[in-house]
Amino acid sequence: MQMTNVIIDFRRYLKRRNYSRHTVKNYLSVLREFVIWLDVPLEQLTSQKIDEYIDYLHGKRMQAASINIYLASVRVFYRYLRHEVGIKLPNAFRAGKRLRTPKPLPRFLQEEQVERLFDVIRGRRDQAMFMLMLRCGLRVSEVAGLGLNQIDLKRRRVIVCNGKGGKERMVCISDDAREDLSAYLNQRTSSRVKKVFLVEKGNCKGQPLSVRGIQKRMEYYAKKAGLPVCCHQLRHTMATQLLNAEAKIATIQDLLGHNWISTTQRYCKISNLAVQRDYQQAMQKIVERSAQRAPHHVFKPCMIESRQNVLDKQ
């Protein structure tokens, strides 16, 4: 089996399955490293060999989440060989070939932190693109790939065509985000480029602003505001604010483009004011009921004091 030809065919397979360019690049990078490491033919790949591969990745001091990404890449290639190429391979990826990973809660900004951040943001372009993340929950890649034809200011909506996994969704625009976006578009340098956000200085002026370019702008403003914030936290902040305003969890799921509602429900565990209100109201009733029953089973303060005096005398 010519490995080079197999990898080329695998690349074509990923493209046919509409995997993103970024995903294809990462899969092939992982696969090349795996093939170099593997000291036996693919037909002899066993579960024990996968365990050795995990130990090898641990030896490189990789985090569990990164190791799982490597395993997922090899697993996709393994399934491709079995089901698409028809190569009979042993079941190396039996159940459990995945490392347990911590599931930290989404990090979001408090209201005063949002104000501090946007107080230092300058320029209509930057104000508009970061407001889209905060009010519409857009990912940084979705902002970078946003086209002029995807914006409908009259209907106050944006059609996201380049979402995670190639999914398309519709998000709403708030009044302040609409105002900032409209102000930027009115002063935006005319260009044949159809992307919304463009480089404004340097040799690349007029070209689409890259994901890394947007992240660098956020790093600059975060340092200026003295906040440990990244672009994705604006998306988390939007979800948390909607939840605190008692928006339905299914609505937030649609706006964020989550496949599973369990992903959206993670926000229920952080700073949920609705939960706090329910707790306070319920606890108030419990305390009131306890106070009504107190004379029947709780010592009066004077009785407790007299008992203490007796003990002191003894």
Image (spheres, rainbow, N blue to C red):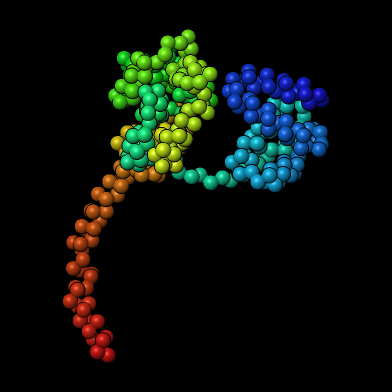
In-image side of 245 versus 81 (left or right): left
Q: State how many labels appear.
A: 0
The residue lying at 39 percent from left, 39 percent from top is 225
Q: Is residue 305 above or below residue 29?
A: below
Q: Is residue 242 visible?
A: no
Which quadrant would the N terminus be assigned to in this image? top right
The residue lying at 24 percent from left, 82 percent from top is 308
- Provide residue 159's location: percent of width, then percent of height: 42, 18
Q: Quadrant of residue 304?
A: bottom left
Which quadrant would the C terminus be assigned to in this image? bottom left
Q: Is residue 192 visible?
A: yes
Q: Single out the residue that lies furthest toward the bottom.
A: 314
Q: Is residue 63 above or below residue 217?
A: below
Return the residue nearer the eye: 242 or 111. 111
The residue lying at 45 percent from left, 24 percent from top is 143
In-image side of 5 versus 18 (left or right): right
Return the residue nearer the eye: 37 or 281. 37
Q: Quadrant of residue 296?
A: bottom left
Return the residue nearer the eye: 266 or 151. 151
Q: Single out the residue that lies furthest toward the top.
A: 192
- Provide residue 233's location: percent of width, then percent of height: 43, 36
In-image side of 280 versus 134 (left or right): left
- Provide residue 183's location: percent of width, then percent of height: 33, 19
The residue lying at 21 percent from left, 66 percent from top is 294
